[in-house]
Image: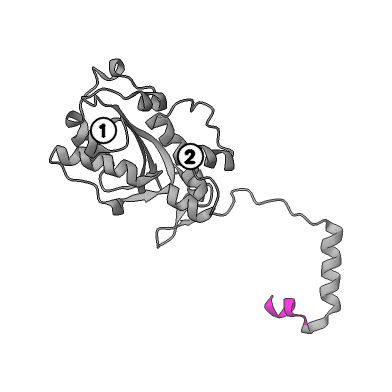
Amino acid sequence: MREIVLDTETTGFEPMQGDRIVEIGAVELFNHVPTGRTYHQYINPERGMPQEAFAVHGLGDEFLADKPKFAQIGQAFLEFVQDSTLVIHNAAFDMKFLNAELKWMNLPTLPMSQALDTLEIARKKFPGSPASLDALCRRFNIDNSSRTLHGALLDSEILAEVYLELIGGKQPDFALSTKSKNETQGADGRWRPQPRETPLAPRISQKEAAAHEAFVESLGDGALWKKLG
């Protein structure tokens, strides 16, 4: 199962009022395991950067001046995400901007059904509690000390950790991120544990084992253990 954890930075809040995407960051997961493959792109928004937005992400006009325009990277972005589930914090915001940019290029837009909103998951799981990315990092003891400013790739990497905690913590797949001799899979495609190469040492003493055998003998021939044996 391929998933893309994604974040964007923008010049503001409304693409229909002239705001544009200035950065996209994405992290690839396969069966909930980071593959190490990422997508990261700064984008020239073809407009000035409002001070309010600059204060959030620190991406200014001079820095973005020589970066490609969205029209130059849109197709490559679609080729990276494909039809994979897009894991996004406050998905409506990012999807609104991505689809506006894609529509302006006459490229296929991304259906909202393709997005999985971690903000919505967090609010359902912890009703009434703060559900920002920083708040969830504090809840799950995830180090976000390097997040002095918002950055799309860094936020995607942090969100990937938060997402895995939201869905129940690290899955068995984490030990199986690459094919190995320890990996087993059932007929239904699900992960299955494999017997240990070295059995665990017994946890009862010889004295305890002897006492158990004596107890079973004391039950006579009607003992259930003997019938099953």
Residue 131, how many percent across, how many down?
A: 50, 45
Q: Which residue is mark 1?
A: 19
Of callouts 1 and 2, which one flags the residue occurring earlier in the amino acid sequence? Answer: 1
Instruction: Provide the residue span drawn in magenta.
Output: 223-229
Mark 1 is on which residue type? Asp
Instruction: Look at the numbered disc 2 and give the secondary structure of its residue.
Output: helix
Q: Is residue 221 above or below residue 153?
A: below
Q: Which mark is residue 133?
A: 2
Mark 2 is on which residue type? Leu
Tell me how far mark 1 sits from mark 2, CA to CA. 23 Å
Task: Say if mark 1 contacts mark 2, CB within 8 Å.
Answer: no
Residue 187 in sight from this viewpoint = yes
Residue 181 in sight from this viewpoint = no
Q: Residues within 10 Å of mark 2 (few under 14, many from 20)?
A: some
Q: In percent of the image, x 26 and y 40: which residue is there?
A: 98
Residue 128, how many percent across, how many down?
A: 54, 52
Q: Residues within 10 Å of mark 1 (few under 14, many from 20)?
A: many
Residue 24, how many percent across, how many down?
A: 32, 32
Q: Is residue 128 magenta?
A: no
